[in-house]
Amino acid sequence: MRHIPSGLEQWLYIKLLRSAKFHSFVRSIYCKVNRIQVNNPNAVSQSNFIFQPTATHKFNAFCLLFWDELKNSIGLKRTFNDHFRH
């Protein structure tokens, strides 16, 4: 549930902070002031360094989770209990 703004000024403020164009504008001003060369303003979104798990990674993760669930079902302590908080 979103917080309802109390006035027009606050509503405009929230809209401005959520605007991608505003952030792009501020970034361009920041780069001009600090004399930073900007080749591509969308370089972060076009990054090639996004992790893409291979089939081996997925299989290893499945095995770890499967054995953890199996241990839990027979009454032994879970290995990954801290990582799965609800």
Image (cartoon, rainbow, N blue to C red):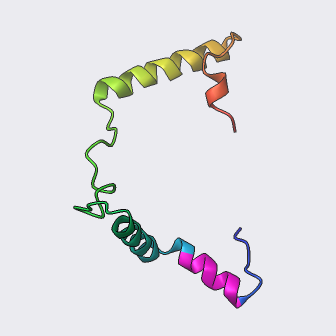
Relative side of 48 to 66, left or right: left
Q: 64 or 82, which is in the foreground? A: 82
Give residue 25's position: percent from left, percent from top.
40, 75
Where does the C terminus fall, quadrant-wise? top right
Question: Compared to 28, does 83 lie above or below?
Answer: above
Relative side of 23 to 38, left or right: right
Q: 24 or 50, which is in the foreground? A: 24
In the picture as drawn, the residue positioned furthest to the left comes out as 39
Q: Residue at x 39, y 20 (%)?
A: 60
Give residue 33's position: percent from left, percent from top.
38, 68
In the picture as drawn, the residue positioned furthest to the right comes out as 6
Where does the N terminus fall, quadrant-wise? bottom right
Give residue 35's position: percent from left, percent from top.
32, 63
Question: Compared to 2, does 52 lie above or below?
Answer: above
Tell me the quarter of the picture where residue 62 sits: top left
Magenta-colored stretch includes residue 24: no
Q: 61 or 73, which is in the foreground? A: 61
Question: Compared to 3, does 63 lie above or below?
Answer: above
Give residue 67's position: percent from left, percent from top.
53, 15
Q: How many marks?
A: 0
Mostly what secondary structure, the magenta segment?
A: helix
Q: Residue at x 74, y 87 (%)?
A: 7
Q: Residue at x 44, y 72 (%)?
A: 26
Tell me the quarter of the picture where residue 15 sits: bottom right
Magenta segment: 8-16
Relative side of 58 to 19, left or right: left
Q: 65 or 8, which is in the foreground? A: 8
Q: Residue at x 69, y 82 (%)?
A: 10
